[in-house]
Image (cartoon, rainbow, N blue to C red):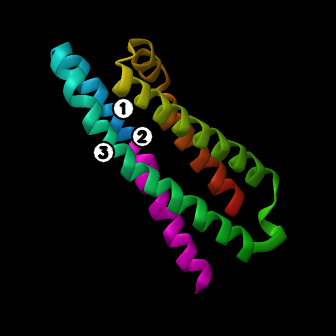
Amino acid sequence: MLYKTLLLLHMFGLTVGAGTGFFIAAVGRHAARNMEQAEARTLIPGINGAISKVGSVGLALLLVSGVGLALVMGPAALNAAFQIKMALVAMIIAFVGTMHYLAARTRRAGDVQAAQMMRKLGPLGPLLAVATLIAAVMAFH
């Protein structure tokens, strides 16, 4: 019962976290195609910031439930696919931290270079999410 509860929480965290990355990417594409630059610069950071907070909650839930799953599974969880998954999780954490840092620079100082870097790095989030999901399926089944 504990394993299934942790797995449910883990999948919920994954859904929220990964969904956030895809949603932010879609909002960015929509803004680039359908909004004036001035309008996008004022509206999109607030929208993405709110969405990002939800994604951070999903990531935290994913991490906490993941530790619980690993403890419940014991040494059986420590296969090569699990190690790859954990490396991808570390990359996701670094990605999220970098994006939060760049967003703060953009908001506080109007740093155009930080905003450009966010646009370049943005597509990496969904790719990391999919790669992590593939590794997780391989690790746990």
* Residue situated furthest front in the rendering: 109
Residue 16, by quadrant, is bottom left
| Quadrant in which the N terminus is drawn | bottom right
Where residue 65 sits in the image (x, y, percent)? 58, 67
Magenta highlight range: 1-20
Q: Label 1 amino acid?
A: Ala
Mark 3–mark 1 CB contact (< 8 Å): no
Q: Assess whether residue 39 is covered by the magenta stretch.
A: no
| Quadrant in which the C terminus is drawn | bottom right
Where residue 96 sits in the image (x, y, percent)? 52, 39
Mark sitting on residue 21: 2
Residue 106, by quadrant, is top left
Mark sitting on residue 50: 3
- Looking at marks 2 and 3 on the same chain, the residue that comes earlier in the sequence is marked by 2
Q: Residue at x 59, y 65 (%)?
A: 64
Q: Assess whether residue 12 is covered by the magenta stretch.
A: yes
Find the distance from the CA under tag 3 to the CA under tag 1. 14 Å
